[in-house]
Amino acid sequence: MTKIRIHAGNLSFEASLNDSATADAILECLPIDGHVNVWGDEIYFRIPLALDEAPEARDEVGTGDLAYWPPGNAFCIFFGPTPASLDQEPRAASPVNLFGHTAATPAQLRLIADGSPIRVELADS
């Protein structure tokens, strides 16, 4: 399983990528730099990648899921309820392509402020 490292604000954490075309496309773009947008308990940022919605795309996601949001060309990290949530589970604004997962906790991710710089790179082996 391929691992990436995400640096955002003062936090640095690893994530594992799944075996999907979206994960492969993300890997091809690394390293990626951007600025954090916060939407409820979701961090997202625009990346230089334009992908279509995958056949298995969905708006119901889990805590710690990494996803690509096709309408915004965005890398998303879900860690709790968003304005689209119906309960306490994360929910994307529209279907996303899931491509990985992080064990970073919601408490840690909530410390990342809107506008913070963010960098995604391949983790050290």
Image (cartoon, rainbow, N blue to C red):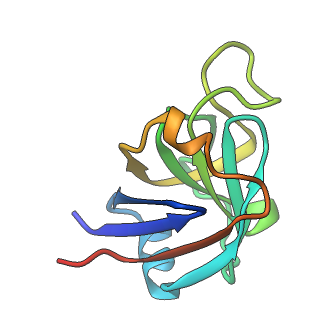
Give the side of residue 44 with respect to residue 109, left or right: right
Q: Residue furthest left?
A: 125
Q: Which residue reaches farthest front?
A: 10
Q: Is residue 10 left or right of residue 94?
A: left
Q: In the image, what residue occupies the spot 55% across and 44% down?
A: 109
Of all residues, the one furthest to the top in this rendering is 87
Frontmost residue, 84 versus 12? 12
Vertical order, 107 against 65 (above or below): above
Provide residue 6's location: percent of width, then percent of height: 47, 66
Relative placement, left or right, of 38 versus 59 is right
- Provide residue 59's location: percent of width, then percent of height: 67, 37
- Tally of numbered tags: 0
Percent position of residue 93, x then y = 79, 41
Residue drawn at 67 percent across, 51 percent down: 43
Q: Is residue 102 above or below residue 119?
A: above
Which quarter of the rendering shows the N terminus? bottom left
Residue 11 higher or lower than 34, as above or below: above
Q: Quadrant of residue 27?
A: bottom left
- Write the residue at 39% across / 48% down: 102
Tell me the quarter of the picture where residue 115 sits: bottom right
Name the image quarter holding residue 45: bottom right
> Who's the residue at 70% across and 57% down the image?
44
